[in-house]
Image (cartoon, helix red, strand yellow):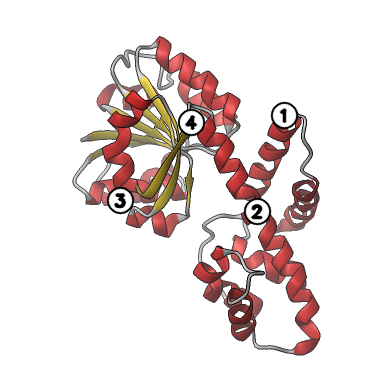
Amino acid sequence: MNIGIAGTGRMGSAIAARLIGLGHTLTVWNRTPEKTKVAVAAGAAVAATPAELASRVDVIITILTNAAAIDAVYYGGDGLLAGEVKGKLFIEMSTVRPETERALAGWVAKKHAQLVECPVGGTVGPAKEGKLLGLVGADPLALDRARPLLEQMCRRFEHVGPVGAGAAMKLAINLPLIVFWQAFGEAVSLTKPLGIDPARLVEIFADTSGAATVLKNRGAAVAKALAGEDTGPATFDLDSMRKDLRTMLEEAQSLGVELPTAARVLEAFDRAAHAGHGGMDGVRIPAWVSG
């Protein structure tokens, strides 16, 4: 299949490598050309603009930073929707508010194309292995068309409703995950006087109902961070979590509900970012919180 990817950050590059490995033909575009290097090394071609990308492929996958990036990449003068896209399929995987996806679906429909939203759970490792969790918002006919690709990118995907539903579900799922990193750091601070080895401490927590699944999956990296060791490149960093928390709070306000826990964690993460730790991976947050 001839596929384009707009947005080749960590996740976009990992998805590109996965699809190339399965035999698809890939063309990529990124606002910062330097970030296409990983995909190019895996065998992808590069388009000069989003419009050129859309003209060269049948399916366009986008995984972008935020709503402003979606506006620029889709609606700009050289955007994905600037040219003829009739009959093409867009798979939008960014983490944004539902209203952003619904508005985009309307414009895609006006261009006689189809849109499936599928924000995903998982980081770079699962993306490379096709083991993401997809949260799909789509018309059933569009989903049927996207299904073969989603099955190659995701270990599981759930159709949770029309466009906008996937975005809402992704924000909901990310909330307890992000809050967990702060809560676990606070819990670790209570164990400091015990002098327990970090690896043993993490193993104890991971065997209790007080731990999130992420601690079982990434416990070794968390233990390294608590021991002051290097944990490698960030996969889901603090700045990305801050963006998601702000998006959650905006969505909650529009629904007339409050998220006091998310608001307090955002305050704590803002302090960490202002201290220069915005690029810190999630596994390092407990070490920072516990001191």
Q: Secondary structure at mark 1?
A: helix
Q: Amino acid at mark 3?
A: Arg
Q: Position of residue 179 (x, y in %)?
A: 69, 56
Q: Are marks 1 and 4 in contact (CB under 8 Å)?
A: no
Along the line of sight, which residue is nearer the eye, 98 or 257?
A: 257
Q: Amino acid at mark 2?
A: Pro
List the residue tagged with mark 4.
161
Q: Position of residue 125 (x, y in %)?
A: 41, 59
List the residue tagged with mark 3.
18
List the residue tagged with mark 2.
176
Side (left or right) of 24 relative to 116 = left
Q: Position of residue 109 (x, y in %)?
A: 41, 14
The residue shown at (38%, 49%) is 156
What separation in Å lies between label 4 and label 3 (alpha carbons)? Answer: 27 Å
How crowded pointer 4 is (Cα within 10 Å; few <14, some 14-19, many 20+) is rated as some
Q: Amino acid at mark 1?
A: Leu
The residue shown at (63%, 67%) is 284
Determine if residue 77 is in view: no
List the residue tagged with mark 1.
255
Q: Earlier in the sequence, mark 4 or mark 3?
A: 3
Q: Are marks 4 and 3 in contact (CB under 8 Å)?
A: no
How crowded pointer 3 is (Cα within 10 Å; few <14, some 14-19, many 20+) is rated as many
Kindly indicate the quadrant of the structure image that contains residue 78.
Answer: top left
